[in-house]
Image (tube, rainbow, N blue to C red):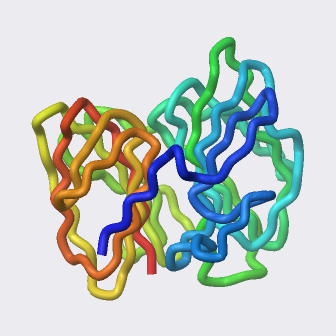
Amino acid sequence: MIELRPHRELGGAHHGWLDTRHHFSFAEYYDPERMHWGNLRVWNDDTIAPHTGFPRHPHRDMEIITYVRKGAITHQDNLGNRGRTEAGDVQVMSAGTGIAHSEMNEEDETTQIFQIWIMPNETGLPPTWGTKPFPKGERSGSFVTLASGLPGETEALPIRANARLVAATLEAGKSTEYHIAAGRKVYLVPATGQIEVNGVVATAGDGVAISDERLLKVSARADSEIVLVDVA
């Protein structure tokens, strides 16, 4: 089953400094049919104005991945971590027993991010944070794992969840495949461009919810950047 969730139909809000779209119920947006997708709980598409951002606030017992689409985001937390993550790279925060952090756009340009929350395998563990630059060329033409809690995927940023996040860049006319293990679900969003997934066309910002499929054939109708989460 493949369900297209067009960007224009997503929930969301305008806060002046923040323009946000919610793929799943979040904050004041509530849709009982879109509470989660497997253990994927949140996928927010955030556009953050220059020199603004999310001031310090707490989380606990959630795996939070930030994929930067444009610009950069600067993280700071009560554990003493501080880091800047720029377009195409990811940061991971395991909230564990509790962490307070800020996520600020300290740039002179607008920043765009995907903020992705995945429910953890275990609760009550110590909080952690990490970021990693991934050379963009490694994602050209095929999916590369950027964050994972699955066995053997040690090159990716670790998360405490039965899930992985992958990304790919495809030139117009090019295609790639993604294999799905039995019983798992996938949620896919083109960050840029336009793609076709097993015959379903999705444009930048659209969500594609996938279940009961074993092979995805992804073709680019325009130069595209694709982010995909594979969950139990």
**Which quadrant would residue 116 be assigned to in this image?**
bottom right
Q: How many marks?
A: 0
Residue 211 appears in the picture as rendered: yes
Left or right: where 145 falls relative to 231: left
Image quadrant containing the C terminus: bottom left
Left or right: where 197 falls relative to 206: left
- Picture coordinates of residue 139 (x, y %)? 28, 42
At horizontal 81% and vertical 42% (from top left) the residue drawn is 102
- Picture coordinates of residue 63 (x, y %)? 64, 65
At horizontal 55% and vertical 66% (from top left) the residue drawn is 159
Left or right: where 204 falls relative to 195: right
Please, which residue is most extreme toward the bottom here?
183
Q: Nearer the viewer, residue 63 or 206?
A: 206
At horizontal 22% and vertical 63% (from top left) the residue drawn is 178
Q: Nearer the viewer, residue 230 or 92?
A: 230
Residue 154 appears in the picture as rendered: no
Q: Is residue 82 above or below residue 175?
A: above
Please, which residue is most extreme toward the front here?
9
Please, which residue is most extreme toward the top here?
108
- Picture coordinates of residue 144 (x, y %)? 30, 52
- Picture coordinates of residue 202 (x, y %)? 32, 48
At horizontal 81% and vertical 39% (from top left) the residue drawn is 54
Q: Is residue 10 above or below residue 140?
A: below
Image quadrant containing the N terminus: bottom left
